[in-house]
Amino acid sequence: MPATTRVLIVDDSAAMRQLLSKILSSDPFIDVVGVASDPYIARDKIKDLRPDVLTLDVEMPRMDGLTFLEKLMRAHPMPVVMVSSLTQKGCDITMRALELGAVDFFPKPTIDVLHGVAEAAADIIGKVKTAASARIRGRTASSPPPEIPKSGFRMTDRLIAIGASTGGTEAIREILTAMPSDAPGIVVVQHMPPGFTASFAQRLDSLCRIRVKEAQDGDRVLSGHALIAPGGLQTAVIRSGAQYSVRVFDAPPVNRHRPSVDVLFDSFAEHVKGNAVAAILTGMGDDGARGMRRMHDVGVRTFAQDEASCVIFGMPKEAIAHGGVDHVVPLEQIATRLLTAA
């Protein structure tokens, strides 16, 4: 029988505390052990109740969620799932929360979730239960990414495909910030809802030597550029002559995801073949495992993030089990290995 996940809900809204309590308590393997209306109350309840997971609102009185999260990750690292508003500010704050160590996030639910929107409730429950098994590291001062020298890639030499889910935003940041300005063209699928992928791309663009943007239908995949697949849509790569571009389109979820890593990887297997290298990173589930095997079978060099550096060793583990992975490597080596393979 699965272990019960003990959850503390931190939110200044009494209505939201009640709503999240009802959603989470509907799962027999989640025990909402307490609620807190601000970080000061939460601090005391963490000591008394010893929850496995915290859900944390980003905007609260007395101390905002980001400040509390930063203090918590330094003093008492534990799995935290952020509750984010769908505003531009909310998306930006959520990206910062993931940098500070939050495992995952979900958009702030509405009363509709209790009245027939079962998929949204299941997503919230799934994220909280996944967070309980996450590998959490305390915060330390971050060092700048290693300077990988320019490589002399031409636009059509190689493409890089990357897929990730839970914990992937920070893994992708570490890889892309290490890339030289003339790195091969990169296409990334990170499981995220609409709106958040634009904030994620903007944040990366401000940190990287390469240009990073949210993909739009028809964008060319160019050297020195990375495209982030937009939330709520599927993204694939197509070839026209010597050039590659992305197709961004509305289609049903694959493996419950839009964007899906398998959709991207399948398109690489079909259109890019041996001109590609690929990596699958931290995340829950098996999205990308079959696509990585198909890429591997047509000559793509493939890498999986190792268990020790993953927040969740789900997607890499499944890709390895499907026989599609050439090399299993620590996160800090993936950028260099991708460039060397290219």
Image (cartoon, rainbow, N blue to C red):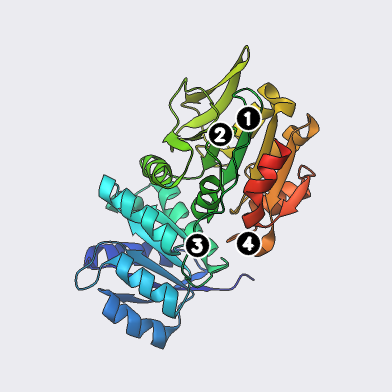
Q: Are marks 3 and 1 in contact (CB under 8 Å)?
A: no
Q: Which element is circle 2 on?
A: loop
Q: Are marks 2 and 3 in contact (CB under 8 Å)?
A: no
In the shown orientation, is residue 304 left or right of residue 210? right
Query: Mark 4 — residue?
Result: 309
Up-down: is 227 above or below 174?
Answer: above
Up-down: is 119 above or below 80?
Answer: above
The answer to whether residue 9 is visible is no
Q: Which element is circle 3 on?
A: loop
Give the x, y percent position of residue 308: 66, 64
Lower sequence index among marks 3 and 1: 3
Q: Amino acid at mark 4?
A: Ser
Q: CA separation, marks 1 and 4? A: 29 Å
Query: Mark 1 — residue?
Result: 153
Query: Mark 3 — residue?
Result: 143
Query: Residue 278, located in which quarter of the rendered image?
Result: top right
* Circle nearer the viewer, 4 or 2: 2
Lower sequence index among marks 4 and 3: 3
Up-down: is 68 above or below 191?
Answer: below
Q: Residue at x 37, y 69 (%)?
A: 69
Query: Mark 2 — residue?
Result: 182
Give the x, y percent position of residue 58: 30, 61
Q: Residues within 10 Å of mark 4 (few under 14, many from 20)?
A: some
